[in-house]
Image (spheres, rainbow, N blue to C red):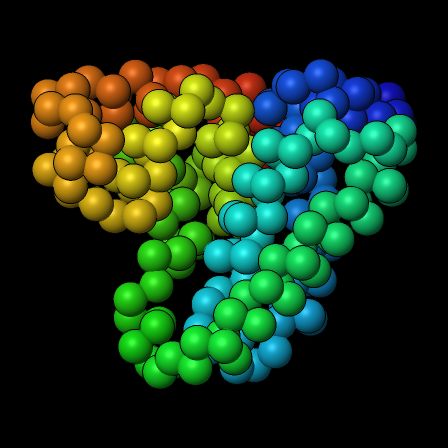
Amino acid sequence: MAENEQRIIWLRQAKQGDSVAMAKLLVAYHSTIKARATEKMGRTLRARMEPDDVLQETYLQATRQMRQFEGKDPHTFLNWVLTILDNRILNATLAMHRQRRDISREVSQASGMAGSSCMNLLDQLYRASATPSQVVRRGEAVAVLSSCLAGLSDSHAKVLQLRFLDGNSVEEVALRMNISKPAVVALTGRALKALRKSIDCVGELTRID
């Protein structure tokens, strides 16, 4: 099947709520989207946050708003995602100038660090069978995880976000979600299982060559 024809199929499936198809679309365009992020982010903003931080927010928003996308071809989809990205970068730049925070303090306190936190989450998913680099290319980790996370139930996505992407302890997650620590552990286990199942469905595209 021709590459564009495959992407048209993924686009149709993604518009129907298929998070795996959405992940495949984002992975297919990841290099283009990341190049845009690197180009559009100024040096000062890049000192405050990594391009992957903006990409994670962009992919999450795109996945959650996919049913609102009215385009019918992959090129229109890419431009739509790039528009979301540009708006994210603009908002981050405006916030940086408005807040006038100390950049070195921001870097140490940033909750994003999407690249490293995504790899930490992949470690949890595949620690018993493979290293993250054997499952997905590092460059695709943010695209795959963000889209698959957005496809999970609210409770599953929230516990994984709080626990692994934001780096909270079990105790802190329990307080944030107003549940017991054993409930956090059990919910985390179910959420990891659901996320791995979703990522494995994308695996055929993201396996190391």
Q: Identify which residue is drawn at 60% across, 48% down.
A: 58
Quarter where residue 54 is shown: bottom right
Residue shown at 15% from the left, 41% from the top: 172
Q: Is residue 184 left or right of residue 157?
A: left
Tell whether 148 sits left or right of 5. left
Residue 196 lies in quadrant? top left
State whether residue 41 appears in this view: yes
Q: Is residue 173 left or right of residue 33?
A: left
Asked whether residue 200 appears in the rendered view, the answer is no
Q: Where residue 114 sits in the image (x, y, percent)?
A: 43, 53
Which quarter of the rendering shows the N terminus?
A: top right
| Image location (x, y in percent) of residue 75 | 87, 42
Front residue of 165/87: it is 87
Residue 109 screen position, x and y as percent: 29, 66
Q: Nearer the viewer, residue 151 or 129?
A: 151
Closest to the observer: 172 or 146? 172
Position of residue 124 measured from the top left corner of the image (x, y, whole percent): 29, 34
- State the residue at coordinates (64%, 19%): 18
On screen, 196 above or below 99? above
Q: Quadrant of the C terminus?
A: top right
| Residue 80, placed above or below residue 110 | above
